[in-house]
Image (cartoon, rainbow, N blue to C red):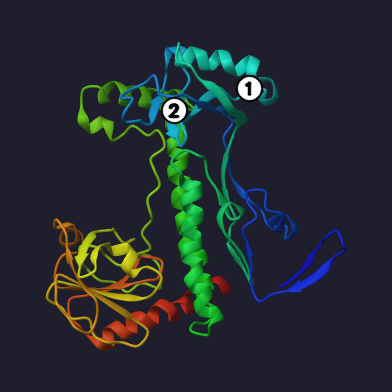
Amino acid sequence: VELTVETPDGPYLLETDWYIACDGAGSATRKRMGLPFEGQTFDEHFLIADVEMETSPFGDHDTPERWFWFAPPFHNGQSALLHKQPDNIYRIDLQLGPETDPKAEATEEKVLPRLKQMLGDAPFRLDWMSVYKFRCARLERFVHDRVVFVGDSAHVVSPFGARGGNGGVQDVDNLGWKLAAVVQGDAPTSLIESYDIERGHGADENMRNSARATNFMTPKSPIETLFRNEVLTLAARHPFARKLINSGRLSQPCTLAHSPLQTAGDAPLRPGSALIDAPLAGPAGDRWLLGEVQGQFTLLAVGGITAPDIPGLSRIGIDQSQDAYPCFQGKDGHAQRRYGSGFLYLLRPDGHVCAVFDQPDRAAISRAFARAFDGALDCAKGATA
């Protein structure tokens, strides 16, 4: 990849093997390459305001909670959101509608009366405000030869559910170990194609859930409004309906079971799943599982099964005693409930289960380990086709 970099002292040429475009939702790289960024734009405008308050006027002052109103009397029947941030800052989102003039609304003369209507007599200081609307969009492909798009330059979603920031971090987790393996000569360049497949799947899932949350919060048709209102009515009396309320469900790691890098298997935590943390006790004190295994390929042996010594794989044991590798005891039964007993888990550096075994079969484990790199050849063939 060749980049021309402009500086006050003039331009210079930069040559690099790989270019990772992390230049945001308005990606200049994407525009220079003429790549379409397609999706759905939502017409609703939202006022976002950060206010400083000693305590929230809502709920338990000692336990700040995220509050959501779907049709509050203090805001003309439109949705409102409040949650606490550090340093006594509370973030407020107020739905304004599609015909809003952002410049007219983002003024203290307009904002302060809205906030006083919501907060009542609670003293507050306006720290920051803006008006925004959003879209769900993505590149068709995240990998273009030696140019790889990451985060908002590759995909954007609504802010509801924390899917944008989490999705970007998951992109980096996914790409980092693969790019390192390619640069160090441990894997073919085709491994990078698996980043497009896996994180494209993650982006689609985030966009789908984000759009569903937005449509529940701001219904676009009479039938969507009827559904939303009936769910809220039922939720007051029936627990089953409470799970249907969608005010921006928080992001969760998607499963990568479909990926050609995984090897099929059956266990409490199946291949393609993200690791679930668990507290451990060891000779040097208490630990957390994720801190012991992430960043490298690792064999996790749980219960009465031994992890064989295979080049390139770290080893760790839970609820067993071995001299060949570190062993820990699960605390309060969390590791046992989440991982079972008598299983070997092959873990990827990004904290996903790559394969699982109920026998310490060196040949089968080695094949699964190789598949985590060579399975990318199938990705490259698909991209070429």
Amino acid type of disc 1?
Answer: Glu
Amino acid type of disc 2?
Answer: Leu
Residue at image x 36%, y 22%? 229
- Quarter of image, res 2: bottom right
Q: Nearer the viewer, residue 149 or 40?
A: 149
Residue at image x 76%, y 72%? 14
Please tell me whether residue 285 is drawn above or below residue 222 in the rendered image. Answer: below
Direction front: furthest residue: 284
Identify the secondary structure beneath mark 1.
Answer: loop
Q: Left or right: 255 with respect to 77?
A: left
Rounded to the nearest angstrom, the CA distance separating label 2 from label 1 is 23 Å
| Residue at image mark 1 | 99
Q: Position of residue 353 (x, y in %)?
A: 32, 68
Q: Position of residue 200 (x, y in %)?
A: 50, 59
- Quarter of image, res 122: top left
Please tell me whether residue 31 is drawn above or below residue 121 in the rendered image. Answer: below
Q: Work out which quarter of the rendered image holds the N terminus and state it.
A: bottom right
Q: Position of residue 31 (x, y in %)?
A: 72, 54
Residue 385 in view in this figure:
no
Direction left: furthest residue: 304
Structural crowding at the residue carrying mark 2, measured as other residues with C-alpha within 10 Å and reported as few (<14), some (14–19) or many (≥20): many
Labelled disc at residue 82: 2
Say how many tags the image has.
2
Q: Reading the chain from its start, which is encountered first: label 2 or label 1?
A: 2
